[in-house]
Every structure is written in structure tokens, then in C-alpha cells.
Image (tube, grey):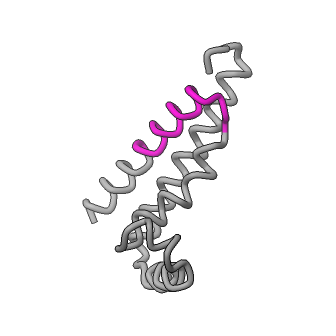
Amino acid sequence: MIQLVVSVVLFFVLFFGLSFILNMLLRRTWIMAFIFPIVVLLIVDTFPISTYFTDPVSAFQIVGDRFVGLKVHDVVILLSGLLGTIVSGIVIKKLRKSGYQMF
């Protein structure tokens, strides 16, 4: 249970920070929200990225099966990362609205 709480906080902070920095550098507010599903694919799959290009049907079938097989705590951890990216976008938008032009 303690590991779940620590993992949720860690993923939230990790993806918030990555999103914030990426948004600040690229000046695209929601870019990490679009990149997040790719990151989740890389976390869930067990094969090289090249498999998506060499054998896409098999790769997506395997990833689909792995998604279905995820436990509740894994889904909660991944959703906390998504929440971190969304909160980062909201914070960036509020900072820009408040007059911070570097964001």
C-alpha cells in the first residue's frame, strides 16, 4: 500500500515536471498530453520499438493484451502520470494568463 502511494506521487511529480519543462521549451501547452500515450506504450510493452514498424499487427495485439492484463494499481499509477501532465498544462496556461511570457 505504501508503494502504491509513493508510486502515485512519483509518477504525478515526474510527469508534471517533464510536461512543464517540455511546455516551457516548446511553447506548446498540451504537447505532453499527446505524447503521454506513446510513453505508456513504452512502459507497458516488453519488446523493442522497432517491432511496431516491422510487425505492427502482432505488436498492437500484444500491447492490447497487456493493457487488458494490467492490475488496478498499475492503472492508478499510470493515470496519476496523466493527471500530472494535465495539471502541468493548466498551470502553464494560468502562468501565461498572469503575464509570465517565458511560459
Magenta stretch holds residue 26: yes
Q: Which residue is at a point 33% across and 56% down the rendered structure image?
A: 7
Q: Is residue 31 above or below residue 20?
A: below
Classify the position of the C terminus by image quarter.
Answer: top right
For this view, does 48 lie left or right of residue 78? left
Quarter of the view holding residue 24: top right
Q: Main secondary structure of the magenta part?
A: helix
The x, y position of residue 1, in whole percent, is: 28, 66
Q: Is residue 65 above or below residue 96?
A: below
Considering every residue shown, the one lying at the far left of the view is 2
Frontmost residue, 29 versus 93:
29
Quarter of the view holding residue 49: bottom left
Q: Which residue is at a point 37% across and 68% down the rendered structure image?
A: 48
Magenta stretch holds residue 59: no
Q: Which residue is at a point 57% across and 52% down the rendered structure image?
A: 35
Q: Is residue 37 above or below residue 23?
A: below
Q: Is residue 48 above or below residue 89?
A: below
The x, y position of residue 63, in whole percent, is: 48, 78
Magenta residue span = 13-29
The x, y position of residue 78, in whole percent, is: 46, 62
Considering every residue shown, the one lying at the far right of the view is 97
Q: Which residue is at a point 66% across and 36% down the rendered structure image?
A: 29
Task: Count numbered badges in the picture.
Answer: 0
Frontmost residue, 30 versus 100:
30
Frontmost residue, 81 versus 27:
27
For this view, does 47 lie left or right of residue 38? left
The x, y position of residue 23, in whole percent, is: 59, 33
